[in-house]
Amino acid sequence: MNIIEIENLSHRFADGTVGLENINLSISEGAFVVIAGRNGSGKTTLLKHLNGLLLPTKGVVTLFGRSVAKNLTWSRQMVGMVFQDADSQIVGETVSDDVAFGPENLCLDRTEVNRRVSLALETVGLHHHKDQKPHLLSGGEKRRLAIAGILAMEPKVLIFDEPFSSLDYPGVKEVLAQMISLHQAGHTIIVAAHDLEKLIAHTDRLVIMEKGGIVRDDLPSYLLGDLEVFGIREPCASRLGMEVHSWLN
Amino acid sequence: MAELNVLGFHAGNSVLHQLDVRFKLLFLVVISLSSLNAFIPSLVLLTLVLMVALKHAGLPLKMALKDLRYVLLLLLFVFMARSLSVPGSPVVEFKGVTVTREGLYEGAIVCWRLVIVIMTGLLFVLTTRSSEIKAAVEWMLKPFPFIPAKRIAIMMSLVVRFIPIIFEQAKKTMEAQRARGVENRKNPVYRLKMFSIPFMRRIFERADKLVLAMEARCYSENRTDSLLSSGVKDWIALAGVVCLCLIIIT
């Protein structure tokens, strides 16, 4: 079953720049999709249409058959987004306050808010940091906090925009393990990335974007040879003619 | 890792953390107003009480002084202005500028009062979540029909939330400029211009990102508020603060 349907989506920014041009894409429930492309190819712009942070100039985005543009609050609850800059996503003064922010916006009663906060913090393994100031967490922990913040809203789809940017190796492993565990728990995962090295072993679909359009959409193994044409580095193992392994092994 | 910043909430289990935010807001106003009428003995008493309270709330004093160093500069400016402008018996005279005994005394008293107000505010911010401040402001404005209580409360809580970010950005901008030798330029206007333009741009960019992140998490004016509940502790604290203020103003 397709959870997201995008038909003829185009987006022009206020200054006339073309952000997206005639995008057609369907994403099935439970998929792990990576959207790759060089900087400025339109990855983030596309992701922002999935929860209505940007609205189409032309075309329609539907989620479970309902228009995103006409159901903004519901869409943002269903599609949780982890931004590239985790610091900018933090709004609470303590870790638990930050996780509570989303459920509070949904006007849930206090008991339910507290239940969701505990559950989300348990899921990402940050419950022992619940009273800590978020800005004192490490890079990987901040990214996991951002994930907890959206998990507390109980979304079906999780979007990650460049989830490994400015993370060290342990941070990358923490976040990658979290993403895989969420996928195994049944969430649909969509990731925007320009570096596929860390993700390619886990994804079941690769979409390549160029100049605001989709230029390739297939199984990752079929596209490995084409990557560098579109400004994406081919994973090291693949370059050497070897099988690509997970970063978690 | 980011550095700690005292100008924000610090989680804790002190009595002050447990007090109802409405009472704390009232204490802030009453103590600040009383301090404006206080002289040396009362100021000593207030300072001691507030220092004990700050210690109890878990404020790292060294860090607080470091973070508030620009406020201390402002106090120095106020002190100098008072010392030079109040007439009285001269202590120092230099090229027509006279520092008077009365001026020094008044300057010291005004600065001391301002320090009391700052310490009280610090204590409040240190022990109160911005969501609680929002709920308290909303509760206090509710009886006034033509005031948009929710909106004002949200604006206040966002301002409190944004203060540490502004300080952090200022620090980053200054460090970046020092790394490129801005200290070699002696013209303060040039340095102010070169600091303020990127600083303001970064603050607005950060605000934009924050707005987007809040929108992505369904932010609206109608949301689950913090629970406001008062108990015996709050009334005992109120009695204590009233007694303290009576001692100060009499």
Image: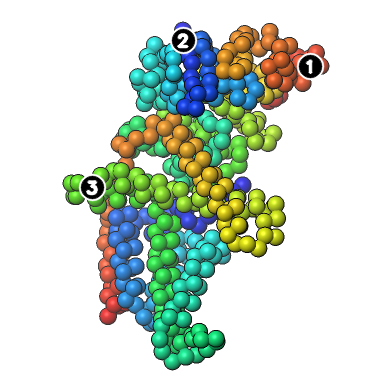
Residue A20 visible in this rendered orientation of the protein: yes
Q: Seen in the image, is A211 located left or right of residue A91?
A: right
The Cα atoms of the two marked residues, 2 and 3, are separated by 45 Å
Q: Residue at x 47, y 41 (%)?
A: B207
Please name the amino acid that badge 3 sits on.
Ile
Of residue A140 and residue A45, the one placed in the foreground of this image is: A45
| SS state under label 3 | loop
Q: Which residue is mark 3?
A: B147
Mark 3 chain: B
Q: How is the image coloured?
A: rainbow
Q: Amino acid at mark 2?
A: Glu
The answer to whether mark 2 and mark 3 are in CB contact below 8 A is: no
Image position, residue B54 (x, y; %): 45, 64
Front one among A81 and B181: B181
**Residue at coordinates 62% horizontally, 10% vertically from top-left?**
A216
Image position, residue B240 (x, y; %) = 30, 69
Q: Chain of mark 1?
A: A
Report the Cα–Cα distance between label 2 and label 1.
35 Å
As drawn, B232 above or below B73: above
Farthest right residue in view: A240
Horizontally, is A65 left or right of A205 in the view? left
Q: From this viewpoint, is residue A185 visible?
A: no
Depth check, front residue: B247 or B186: B186
Residue A120 marker: none
The residue identified by callout 1 is: A239
